[in-house]
């Protein structure tokens, strides 16, 4: 989730304090304030296969709480996910977990089904400005209703490093149990104060992406454009508000 992640090669498992960490790695949820964000991603320009999502991060005296909602599809087929997340830390070691309910609806009297999944995330600042993060998705191996259709299960691990005050690089490896290993990488550069340019690449599937973002005191906006070979271009946009 998030246009920043899209434009940086779909990396996010080791990106600290992003608004969309409740989806990418709960251990990386921000701890410096509250926020609410909204996101949209249109696959290769087709309205019927659009992602829409929203997330909120809220600080408490006993950790960070997160909640999110995600919808994919249209009236004849759609998948809806509702998520609750929690993150805390012990020194430089960060940990968290989430529970989500995913519901699939198919039109034409084909019915619907749902399943509950559990994710966990870990992260640590290995050295100054060098972060390691890892996540496991749907650990309980959930299936939709009484079918044999499983929710996606994957393991991901990666690094992010603040090369300079202006440049950030990320890399990660993702393995879905049903698909080959995907290698991903991204770069962010602060062109001028608060204005960021980004680029990224993935394998399995092969994609290239770029984008930009602007970070203000109480809000931010991010745009990404992903080229999938051979399908085409897909735009992404998100807007966040901090309070």
Image (cartoon, rainbow, N blue to C red):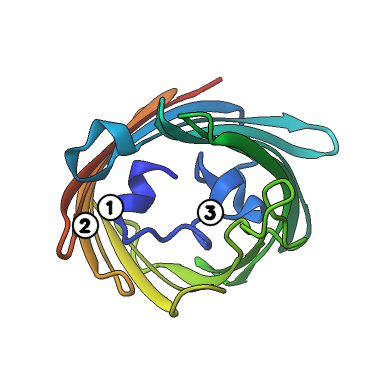
For the residues labelled 3 and 2, the Cα–Cα distance comes to 20 Å
Location of mark 3 (residue): 16
Give the quarter of the figure containing the C terminus: top right
CB contact under 8 Å: marks 3 and 1: no
Residue pictured at 38% horizontal, 76% vertical? 183
Residue 178 seen in the figure: yes
Residue found 67% across the figure and 35% down from its top: 66
* Residue 186 relative to residue 197: left or right: right
Place of residue 142 in the rendered image (x, y in percent of width and height, measured from the top left): 72, 56
Q: Mark 3 or mark 2: which comes first in sequence?
A: 3
Q: Mark 2 highlights which residue?
A: 209
Question: Which sits in the foreground, 91 or 56?
Answer: 56
Where, by quadrant of the figure, is residue 206 drawn? bottom left
Taking 40 as reference, is 2 above or below it?
A: below
Front-most of residues 190 and 231:
231
Q: Residues within 10 Å of mark 2 (few under 14, many from 20)?
A: many
Q: Position of residue 160 (x, y in %)?
A: 46, 67
Quadrant position of residue 40: top left
Q: Badge 1 is on which residue?
A: 7
Q: Kindly check if marks 3 and 2 are in contact, taking CB atoms under 8 A apart as contact.
A: no
Q: Residue at x 51, y 72 (%)?
A: 158
């Amino acid at each position: 989730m998030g246009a920043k992640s899209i434009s940086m090669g779909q990396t996010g498992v080791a990106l600290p304090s992003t608004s969309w960490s409740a989806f990418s790695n709960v251990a990386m949820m921000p701890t410096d304030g509250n926020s609410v964000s909204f996101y949209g991603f249109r696959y290769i320009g087709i309205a019927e296969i659009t992602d829409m999502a929203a997330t909120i991060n809220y600080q408490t005296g006993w950790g960070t709480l997160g909640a999110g909602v995600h919808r994919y599809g249209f009236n004849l087929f759609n998948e809806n996910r509702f998520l609750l997340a929690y993150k805390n830390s012990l020194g430089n070691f960060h940990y968290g977990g989430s529970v989500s309910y995913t519901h699939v609806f198919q039109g034409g009297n084909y019915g619907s089904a749902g399943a509950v999944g559990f994710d966990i995330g870990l992260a640590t600042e290995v050295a100054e400005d060098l972060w390691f993060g890892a996540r496991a998705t749907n650990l309980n191996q959930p299936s939709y209703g009484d079918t044999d259709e499983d929710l996606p299960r994957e393991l991901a691990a990666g690094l992010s490093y603040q090369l300079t005050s202006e440049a950030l690089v990320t890399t990660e490896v993702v393995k879905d149990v049903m698909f080959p290993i995907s290698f991903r990488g991204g770069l962010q550069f602060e062109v001028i104060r608060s204005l960021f340019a980004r680029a990224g690449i993935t394998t399995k599937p092969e994609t290239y992406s770029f984008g930009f973002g602007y970070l203000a005191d109480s809000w931010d906006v991010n745009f990404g454009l992903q080229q999938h070979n051979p399908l085409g271009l897909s735009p992404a946009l998100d807007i966040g508000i901090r309070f």
